[in-house]
Amino acid sequence: MKLTDIQQPDDIRNLSYAECDRLAEDIRETIIRTVSKNGGHLSSNLGAVEITIALHRVFHTPEDKLVFDVGHQSYTHKLLTGRAARFNTLRCYGGLSGFPKCSESEHDCFETGHASTAISAALGLARARDLSGEKHHVVAIVGDGALTGGMCYEALNDCGNSKTRLIVILNDNQMSIARNVGALNNHFAQLRASAGWNVAKKRVKYTLAQIPLIGKPLATFFHSIKKSLKALFLDEGFFTTLGFKYLGPIDGHDIRAMEEILMRAKELDEPVVIHCCTKKGNGYRKAEKSPERFHGTPPFFIESGESQKRGHKLYGQTAADELIALAKKDSRIVAGTAAMPLGTDADRFQTKYPDRFFDVGIAEEHAVTLCAGLARGGMRPFFFVYSTFLQRAYDQVLHDVCMQNLPVVFLLDRAGLGNEDGQSHQGLFDIAYLRHIPNMTLLAPADSGELADMVRAALDLNAPCAIRYPKTATLPNASYPTRPFMLGRWRSLLPGVDAALLAVGSMVGAALNVATRMKEEGIELEVINASTIKPLDGLCLSRLAEAGRPVFTLEEHVMDGGFGSSVLEYAAAHGGKPFTQVIGVKNRFVPQGDHQSLLKETELDEESLYRRIRCALRPEEYTDE
């Protein structure tokens, strides 16, 4: 049977194991081919193929519930649940999501996108099942990297204490995004070593059973000795102490073995952890050798593994390089990340100053408070993190950093639109959840040169500071110089008497283009680079109010609570002038897609901006053709 023949999971349950192996090869080829064109999460999906096939042969979705932690390893699940024909649209605008999506399929029971949430969600589904008097199974599929996040332990402790019937698949590939770190990883290494123990155990048991009369009693005796030794040397008590039945380790690429252990877990009326050992990137040698690089990859050439997108300067590179230059002169500077050294380009600092770099695993809450402690101890920490991932540490930012007014700098990568990973990764909320916190300074560069200036200014600030920027850098434009950057002061880039455009970060370039187009039509717009989001430039706003010209704020962020909201608040507190119109993303979650498609979707592309601003200024001339 080929992958194109599968319309639902029932179609694979009667396959022979030889046919399952061929199906796994077909799935891998499809994933590699699609991700090479669309980009996506490659290594994690190639490592979870056989586990997913076994799960769908043993369990019956949608009645049984499968919850994938993060969800970036769910491509095989999508292919086996009626989405193979549309798989070529993966991560494209209007296509399949790269993560579980309830609106796509009844087989997706819970939407995920960030790490360490699956056990909690699965436990909730299991308790809902029990309260409803139902009998189906609930399975959480969790990578060992996710267990560096504290939510997993909260959920494990709760589940084990209540003895709720739940199955947790621990997919142990020694990787999260970057290679796993910490004591927990060492513990799993010890458990992985016991796979050899299990092979030897089976051989001894078989040999003893062949001895007449005394064979079975000897096997029973040695079984009791084996349990004592295994508990002593392998310490599987990590899970049993939490109240879970521990099964494994087992080869996660062996479909027959996986099915056998899953069938055993189904019969148990208690919480179970099944420990599976897999290889991230399995089946594609380039990904096997460089699993981190192929964790989340842009389109690439299959033969060479080289990216198809070249020459794109990243803002993270600018931030890291500037920090390296500063660290040469300032020994207080340290940097950290939460399992994202490559994704944020923090690995550049790590290479230069390994002793001054801290990767804490998928534990943003811990990372922020660690930075607070470092700052209290006299260091100057810079935390490299995606905008959406810092959301997970909101309380720590407020309570541990800002309440003590500590000099921690948050470098917020992937701010704004343009993420093919979809809703969970759109950086559209950071201004709203940061600007209202006392002591926080919030900045957004218009280009890479301004970002370098901001890194230096943040070091001198001696207070909490967040710098938000998208992935791909905008290079300085000599025609419209944005430098030198001055904290708390905005810069007028283009004069104009009819209205003013207050543009934040990535919207500065669009504002300049719209203003240039309108100037040809006799409408002169002043373009102002509002590089400091908080505090606002009161002098500039007072000047605009005195001039009485209309003001438009432009931001790649939700309008509710964003930069435009702060300008409206300022205007309300100072007499309500001038007229201000906020332009940003409406209060909604934005799907996956390329940057240009999403700008058009949210009406932030240059054509939409032009039409909206022109309509507001010259409504009598505007026609919607």
Image (cartoon, helix red, strand yellow):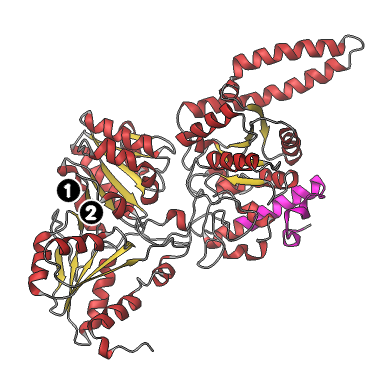
**Circle 2 is placed at which residue position?**
443
Magenta stretch in the rendered image = 2-31
Q: Position of residue 367 (x, y in %)?
A: 35, 36
Q: Residue at position x 40%, y 47% from top?
A: 389
Residue 197's quadrant in the figure?
top right
Based on the picture, tell me whether residue 18 belongs to the magenta stretch. yes
| Amino acid type assigned to the residue bearing label 1 in the image | Ala
Q: Does residue 616 appear in this view?
A: yes
The secondary element bearing badge 2 is classed as strand
The secondary element bearing badge 1 is classed as helix
* Most foreground residue, 252 or 224: 224
Q: Along the polypeptide, which appears first: circle 1 or circle 2?
A: 2
Q: Position of residue 334 (x, y in %)?
A: 27, 36
Position above or below: 282 against 372 = below
Based on the picture, tell me whether residue 265 belongs to the magenta stretch. no
| Amino acid type assigned to the residue bearing label 2 in the image | Leu
Quarter placement of the C terminus:
bottom left
**Circle 1 is placed at which residue position?**
457
Q: Residue at position x 73%, y 34% from top?
A: 261
Seen as rendered, the residue at the extreme right is 212
Q: Are marks 1 and 2 in contact (CB under 8 Å)?
A: yes
Q: Does residue 345 appear in this view?
A: no
Q: Residues within 10 Å of mark 2 (few under 14, many from 20)?
A: many
Position above or below: 25 against 623 = above
In the image, taking residue 547 as reference, residue 226 lies left or right, namely right
* Most foreground residue, 418 or 391: 391
- Distance (Cα) linking label 1 and label 2: 10 Å
In the image, taking residue 342 as reference, residue 103 lies left or right, namely right
Seen as rendered, the residue at the extreme front is 132
Position above or below: 70 against 511 = above
